[in-house]
Image: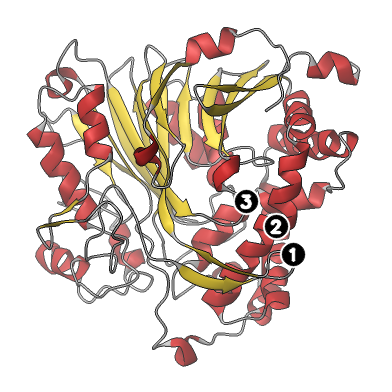
Amino acid sequence: MNKNDILKKACFEEINRVKVLHLKGKPYEMGYQHGYLLADKIDLMVNRTLLATAAYVAAQTGSDLEKAEEILWLGQKAAEPFLPQEFKEEMKGIADGAKDAGVNVTLEQILLWNTNYDQWCIYCHPDYWQGENQGDNQLANKIEDKRSSQQNAIKPAGGGCSSFCAWGEWAGGDGKLIFGKNEDNFNMPEQLPNRILVVASPDDGIGHAFLTYPGMIGLDGGINADGLAMMTQLNSMQYESMKGCGIAIFTRLLLTHARTVEDAIRIFQEHPRCAGIAYHVADAKAKKAVVVETSSRNVCCRYPIQDVKALWQTNHSNCYPGWMGYSGYNMVADQVLVNQLKDISTIENWQNSLKEPYNFYVQAPSRFERYQQLIHKYYGSITVENAIKILSDCYDPYTRLTRDKFFPSWTNNILCTICALYPDFPYKAKEPVGPFKAHIANMWSLVAYPETGDFWLAINDFPAQYGGYEHFNLKELLMRTSVQTSV
């Protein structure tokens, strides 16, 4: 098939103020369409945003920029052998398409860009991975551990993402499963104006939609045409590795191939994993949901409490035996070091340890408590309107204060709310980026009825909720004619 035949099946357009990339075909073809249509934007991601990532990793690890770049490349090389073939082909297509559109980008840069958030997750906590557990001595030798000289330095807070789902009488109305999620991250250079909705129609797999950035094959989940919804959340663990699949890979594996919760769990069990991530998965047709918490060593599943037709998740492990109906391996034990928890000997001590107000590493457990409050508050009426209220909530149950709309959180446990906004932190990257400031807030927010394909997306502000939500229907998007449109 020649270039024109590949491209005529795809388009890039703006719908309801949202940039939408339509892809269709085999993995390489979808990648080529992506690379060709977004070549100028991919250029910004790999030649500017990646420089900012190196600046972040340098700050977190106490390294200079050259060493931070080397760390990132070593991480990419460790991950590459574990890429499923379909996504290797898609990334190759992205690189080839961008080059044919006149942008000087290599496959290696695309591969690196697609490990960006996995490496971000690994280096965002104090006991960042140094390779000891996987025998990666080359990487261990490249990182100088300067935590002792940084003990008094304040690291960027990181509340991270969150999600919930509800169905039956808990949701109200006709009882359809409703799914809501917030993706929280830094506004690194070039990213805010280049947030995109991707609608993918693979020849071999299920049509689906997800949010990402140019050149990246996936990020934090989405919905598929078979009624599956999913969300990813950083859940830092002691045992992490780049020798495995990351969040972009698992997002696309599930959206392309999973029709049930059981399908999703099997995919996590069959593929090696890298950074600690919790995956919230919901099957709208069967009205079933699970949080699959993963690390390089373990896959643990947390289901709704008996008779509770709702499930919610934030960025700290809730896989503590006896807590919220969970039984099995104590995943919290693998978070003691990375979240600097003082005592997890009992559920009560663990919960008290989570609430330490000046813990800069535990990822905002107050939001988990607030979700529980709000889901019970709106019991029987979790409509789209009320789901948006939940995702836009600015109340902190720990301090019992409401965060002002434009006032940032102080720490992960002081005014950290479901609608997230954190202070700026300064960084210095290589030119042409140079010095910049960045902070965490909601990058995009989504409410969906996965079974019907209806979803409401906020993506035009930062926090995204402040720009309002636009309605889409996945089934209609998958049927749109492929007429190329420039944005």
Instruction: Say whether disc 1 or disc 2 marks the residue closer to the N-terminus.
Output: 2
Observer-side mark, 1 or 2, equals 1
Q: Which residue is mark 1?
A: 432
Residue 295: x and y, percent?
45, 55
Q: Earlier in the sequence, mark 3 or mark 1?
A: 3
Q: CA distance from mark 1 to mark 2?
A: 7 Å
Above or below residue 443? Residue 479 is: above
Does residue 80 appear in this view?
Answer: no
Spot occupied by residue 237 in the image (x, y as percentages of width and height): 41, 62
The amino acid sitting under disc 1 is Pro
- Nearest to the observer: residue 445 or residue 66: 445
Residue 467, position in %: x, y?
39, 37
Q: Is residue 73 left or right of residue 105?
A: left
Q: How many marks?
A: 3
Element on which disc 3 rests? loop
In the structure shown, which secondary structural element does the residue marked by tag 1 occupy?
Answer: loop
Residues marked 2 and 3 touching at CB (< 8 Å) = yes
Marks 1 and 2 close (CB-CB < 8 Å): yes
Residue carrying label 3: 190
* N-terminal-most mark, 2 or 3: 2
Identify which residue is drawn at 72% across, 24% down.
486
In the image, residue 300 sits, relative to residue 286, either above or below, namely: below
Residue that appears at 77% across and 34% down: 35
Please name whichever residue, 317 or 119, is drawn nearer the observer in this view of the structure. Answer: 119
Q: Which mark is residue 391?
A: none
Q: Is residue 240 above or below residue 267?
A: below
Give neighbour class at mark 2: few <14, some 14-19, many 20+ (Cα, 10 Å): many
Residue 287 visible here: yes
Residue pictured at 51% horizontal, 9% vertical: 476
Mark linked to residue 48: 2
